[in-house]
């Protein structure tokens, strides 16, 4: 799928918040988003986001706006505060109101939006006996909402939409994690409903991030089912540990799909050795066309607003390193 719309220097979307930023202060939020855009231009990113600054965590676009969910005081299986679905969710307006319009008014860089995948939300918010009859039913209702938001974001000028499902890579392991309320096949079917757009303008990409870290070993057949089951154009895959499983995930990826490599660890401040990273990337040319690729950090820097993974300075160094690696791979042709 080599073309001019691979958005070579990518990031997952969430950025470290400015100290003391209040989400209930619209003027402060607007100023923080503007500054985040300026920083992304300085980092030479080929996509721009609002840094997820207005939201509590990466799920907030849905859980913070769609009726039918209740926030609890308990941690969920993913370590985040758990929300539960008390009824089938129904859209109550845009999930990210004015998102594309705001970003296209601030810069010519392609706007990117990141949303939680409906399968991930269904798997983590379904409570037997409460509201929806099954996790699959909940997931399908969420998929309709997310798909409609993708269509709306594209109409506002957003050119890259990434769905995050941090649970999927656990399910393509040779020894999958314990089954939750949503089976692997149901998860694929639900996320496919959201990701499959019949028509789109030139340059629009729907991406899928199936997890932040590769499992110890990959079941090749299950990985292939994941890729063929969800019609995403772009797969954002971990590639920061140099493991065989990371390479296996790329070997299983169909030739017609783009890939984005998470080449630097967003959880550790120490910088990667560029020669070591490039050595890993160079080996991919035996079976992948790098013209279909891009690079990014391994995950967002602040998927939970009050728990940034790195300091702002360390984040800056990591993103500059991603830009440097991109230039090693593709020169100045972004």
Image (cartoon, grey):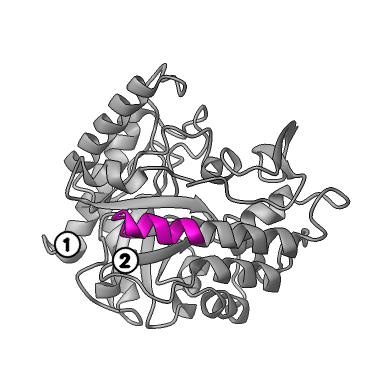
Answer above or below: position of 40 versus 5: above
Residue 252: x and y, percent?
49, 79
Q: Is residue 150 magenta?
A: yes
Quadrant of image for the N terminus: bottom left
Give the camera-side residue of 273 and 198.
198
- The mark lying in front, picked from 1 and 2, is 2
Quadrant of image for the C terminus: bottom left
Residue 78's disc number: none
Our reading of the magenta stretch's main secondary structure is helix
Residue beneath label 1, please?
334
Residue 24: x and y, percent?
46, 21
Q: Residue at x 46, y 40 (%)?
A: 267
User: In the image, is 14 to the left or to the right of 295?
Assistant: right
Report the Cα–Cα distance between label 1 and label 2: 16 Å
User: In the image, is 95 to the left or to the right of 331?
Assistant: right
Residue 110: x and y, percent?
24, 54
Residue 249: x and y, percent?
49, 71
Asked which secondary structure carries label 2, the reply is: loop
What is the quadrant of residue 247 in the picture?
A: bottom left
Q: Which is nearer the N-term, disc 1 or disc 2?
A: 2
Q: Residue furthest left?
A: 332
Residue beneath label 2, please?
204
Asked which secondary structure carries label 1, the reply is: loop
Give the camera-side residue of 256 and 143.
143
Q: Residue furthest front?
A: 93
Q: Residue at x 37, y 61 (%)?
A: 261
Q: Residue at x 60, y 44 (%)?
A: 66
Range drawn in magenta: 148-159
């Amino acid at each position: 799928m080599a073309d001019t719309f691979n958005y070579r220097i990518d990031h997952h979307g969430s950025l470290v918040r400015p100290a003391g930023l209040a989400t209930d202060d619209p003027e402060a939020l607007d100023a923080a988003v503007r500054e985040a855009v300026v920083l992304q231009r300085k980092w030479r990113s080929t996509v721009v986001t609002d840094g997820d600054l207005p939201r509590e965590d990466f799920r907030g676009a849905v859980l913070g706006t769609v009726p039918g969910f209740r926030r609890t005081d308990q941690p969920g299986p993913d370590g985040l505060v758990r929300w539960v679905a008390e009824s089938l969710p129904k859209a109550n307006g845009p999930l990210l109101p004015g998102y594309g319009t705001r970003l296209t008014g601030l810069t010519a860089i392609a706007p990117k939006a990141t949303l939680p995948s409906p399968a991930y939300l269904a798997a983590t918010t379904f409570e037997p006996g409460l509201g929806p009859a099954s996790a699959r039913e909940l997931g399908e209702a969420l998929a309709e909402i997310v798909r409609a938001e993708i269509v709306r974001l594209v109409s506002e000028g957003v050119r890259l939409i990434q769905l995050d499902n941090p649970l999927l890579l656990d399910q393509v392991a040779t020894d999958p994690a314990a089954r939750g309320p949503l089976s692997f096949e149901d998860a694929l079917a639900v996320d496919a409903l959201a990701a499959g757009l019949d028509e789109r303008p030139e340059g629009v990409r729907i991406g899928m991030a199936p997890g932040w870290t590769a499992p110890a070993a990959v079941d090749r057949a299950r990985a292939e089912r994941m890729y063929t089951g969800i019609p995403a154009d772009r797969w954002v895959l971990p590639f920061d540990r140099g493991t065989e499983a990371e390479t296996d995930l790329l070997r299983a990826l169909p030739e017609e799909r783009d890939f984005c490599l998470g080449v630097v660890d967003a959880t550790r401040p120490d910088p990667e050795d560029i020669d070591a990273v490039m050595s890993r990337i160079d080996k991919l040319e035996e079976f992948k066309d790098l013209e279909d690729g891009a690079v990014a950090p391994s995950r967002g820097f602040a998927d939970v607003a009050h728990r940034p993974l790195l300091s702002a300075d360390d984040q800056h160094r990591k993103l500059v390193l991603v830009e440097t690696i991109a230039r090693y791979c593709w020169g100045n042709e972004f």
